[in-house]
Image: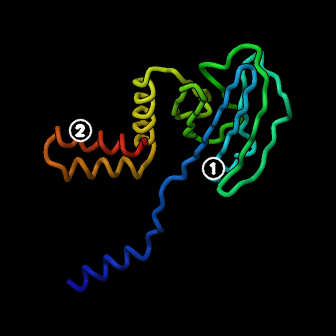
Amino acid sequence: MRSSLFALLTIGAWTSVASAHPTGFALLTVDVDGEQVDAALRVGAGAERAREIELVFPEGCEERAPATTRAVSGGVVRTYALRCATPLRGELRFRGLPVDLQARVEVRGDLRATEVIDAGRPVVRWNAPSGGVLARYVAIGAEHIAIGVDHVLFVAALVLLVPGWRRIAWTVSAFTLGHSV
């Protein structure tokens, strides 16, 4: 018993501290009042290149004032003041995304969206069917599990510990969904 405890403590001493994956976070707030568009993009400190992230507005929008960037507690805020010839609806693009980000769009007039955006798909859309957003979260969760060695080991342990394929499927699905949100 003592030798087992000693072995466990020795192995524990060699391990490093576990930590969660750094998650980038972005909150985009857009206020539309006719032709006037005011937007604020707040990027959390988890994104190392937060100052390089830019919001790209559609054609027909011009700046009423230059965009400003300022450091705030926990990140960076970039503000935009625009005048758009056509109503701003549907989607906005990002440039310079270093990591996956979660973006929430709030537009007065009940237009809202929550999206996961990344360098491969740097677009946030609103008024999209909610099933597309759920499918995106599940796909990112599955990809995240597949590329992470720690995740593969976790799923392998589940296969060994959880009895029955049906319970394994439910457990892995719950893990994927929970880890994606």
| Secondary structure state at the residue bearing disc 1 | strand
Question: Can you tell which mark lies on residue 80?
Answer: none
Q: Quadrant of residue 26?
A: top right
Which quadrant of the view contains residue 30? top right
The picture places residue 87, in percent across and down from the top left corner, at 68, 16
Residue found at the very far bottom of the displayed protein: 2
Q: Which residue is mark 2?
A: 169
Q: Secondary structure at mark 2?
A: helix
Picture residue at 38% right of the left edge, 74% below the top: 12
Q: Earlier in the sequence, mark 2 or mark 1?
A: 1
Disc 2 crowd, CA 10 A, few/some/many (<14, 14-19, 20+) = some
The amino acid beneath tag 1 is Gly
The residue located at (36%, 47%) in the rendering is: 152
Q: Residue at the spot x=27%, y=81% of the render? A: 5
Viewer-side residue, 74 vs 180: 74
Q: Residue 53 at x, y = what percent?
A: 71, 39
Compared to residue 108, the image places residue 17 above or below, namely below
Q: Is residue 159 left or right of residue 92?
A: left
Q: Residues within 10 Å of mark 1 (few under 14, many from 20)?
A: many
The chosen color scheme is rainbow
In front: 167, or 131? 131
Identified by mark 2, the residue type is: Ala
Q: Is residue 32 left or right of residue 11?
A: right
Q: Residue furthest left?
A: 164
Determine the CA span between mark 2 and mark 1.
34 Å
Residue sitting farthest toward the top: 86
Q: Which residue is mark 1?
A: 44
- Residue 85: give x, y in percent of width and height: 77, 14
